[in-house]
Image: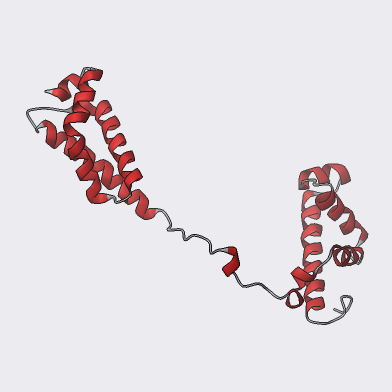
Amino acid sequence: MVLLRVAQGDERAMEQCITKFGPLVWSIAKRHVQDHSALEDIVQEAFTDLWKSAKRYNPAIATESTFVGLLARRRAIDFARKESRRPQLEPLPDANSLPHASIESSATLRCESEDVRAALKELPEETQQIFSLHFDEGMTHPEIVEKTGLPLGTVKTRLRRGLIDLRNKFRRLDSGQSPSNP
């Protein structure tokens, strides 16, 4: 009765248990999971769980192999369920296979720093100041509030409105209109 000795904390008994029941646990896990490294993880988790729960084993209820098999089956099913809930990710395509946008076709790609600076100068002075603190100096909204004394909502609103104004200016630029035309 190797499980009874495992329940008493005998490490040698655990080694014997792994040797005796390793193939059983492996075959049960393999029914539920195909990935080799995941199989190794499941087997390890099953034996770790066995070490912790060996005291629950009752020879009057089940054989050792049944107890170990049920425990391994639970671990494998738990793992398979967890994996089925995980989103399946696809690898990103190679950069060479991605379509390249034409530089002339996109205002965001055409924007040079001079264009951005010129558009920024068209914004209200207080918005320019907040943009400078946020983007040039890297200040957070609370830091801008502390430096300027403006309410947090005002800082956020001016930043958001300024970004919207800039986006609209560059959209007009992309459509061929003059940046100052509404």
Please provide percent x and percent y for residue 146. 83, 42
Q: Quadrant of residue 129?
A: bottom right
- In this view, the residue farthest toward the front is 96
Residue in the picture at 21% in, 35% down: 22
Q: Quadrant of residue 170?
A: bottom right
Q: Nearer the viewer, residue 75 or 40?
A: 40
Please provide percent x and percent y for residue 44. 30, 35
Please provide percent x and percent y for residue 155. 81, 53
The quadrant in which the N terminus is found is: top left
- In this view, the residue farthest toward the left is 60
The quadrant in which the C terminus is found is: bottom right
Residue in the picture at 77% in, 53% down: 153
In the displayed structure, 66 sits above or below 154; it is above
Q: How is the image coloured?
A: secondary structure
Residue 82 visible from this viewpoint: yes
Q: Quadrant of residue 159?
A: bottom right
Residue 55 visible from this viewpoint: no
In the displayed structure, 116 sits above or below 53; it is below
Q: Horizontally, is 95 left or right of 13 in the view?
A: right
Residue in the picture at 81% in, 58% down: 158
Please provide percent x and percent y for residue 64. 12, 31
Q: Horizontally, is 62 left or right of 115 in the view?
A: left
Residue in the picture at 82% in, 77% down: 173
In the displayed structure, 41 sits above or below 127; it is above
